[in-house]
Image: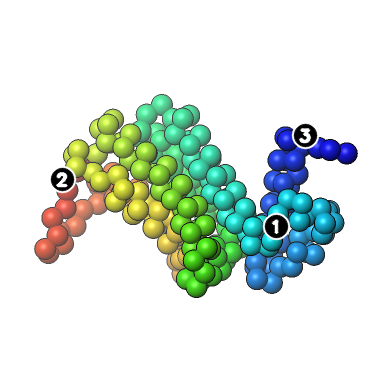
Amino acid sequence: AKLKPEELAARRQEIIEAARNCFLRSGFHQTTTDEICREASITPGGLYHYFGSKEEIITAVIESSAHAAVSRMRTLIEDSGDAHSAFREVAAFFSETMQDPDIDNVTRLEVEIWAEALIDDNMAEYSRRAWALRQQWLEALVRRGTQEGVYGTDKVDPAGMASLLLATYVGLRLGRLLWKDTFDVNGAISSLALLHAGRLRAEIPGVQLPVTTS
């Protein structure tokens, strides 16, 4: 039977989720299209009706994960009454992400994607676009914070601050994965919150730090 556009979109998303589950278990290199078909309860012919190749499936998984993350973070902003509470929600989001039982497998998959991106220009572009979505959202959050007086100066660089927050988010996940119990995730997040609030300051020779208010 011919499916309606919304039914096709829903089925396509089911295949993406099935592929993501397979990639999380085995990595995308080791996962075969037959495994994806079994996970999605679809025939190989049916699979190729939605995706022309395994690379297209990998790309769809990358893009879907990015859109899901941005959608969740956008909701945090929209549901927050002001920038201060929005930043608190972001800190809580970071903390909740670190407690997700699947987070290490997610990080392993992304490390595999990043490694592939070093030698595959197409994969590099897919990965860049996916993370650019996250950075754009963070830049919007920083701009809102500047407008609402979260920062004690109007010289905050939204792109620079967003880059730092994104690098911190990735670094926290890598630290948890690589160093496990010796890496203090909660302590790192608490320290980040103190730094952001201007309650931790250091004098670094040769570096002029912006003036902040607590």
Callout 2 secondary element: loop
Near mark 3 (Cα within 10 A), the count class, few <14, some 14-19 or many ≥20, is few
Residue indicated by mark 1: 52
Residue 8 lies, in percent from the top left, at 75, 41
- The residue that appears at 77% across and 51% down in the rendered structure is 49
Q: As rendered, which of 101 and 199 lies closer to the eye?
A: 101
Residue 38 lies, in percent from the top left, at 82, 59
Mark 1 or mark 2, which is nearer the start of the sequence? 1
Name the kind of residue labelled 3 in the image. Lys
Query: Is the C-beta separation of discs 3 and 2 under 8 Å?
Result: no
Q: As rendered, which of 204 and 5 lies closer to the eye?
A: 5
Q: Quadrant of residue 5?
A: top right
Residue indicated by mark 3: 4
Q: Is residue 142 above or below residue 114?
A: above
Q: Which residue appears farthest toward the top when viewing the image?
A: 81
Residue indicated by mark 2: 211
Residue 177 lies, in percent from the top left, at 52, 67
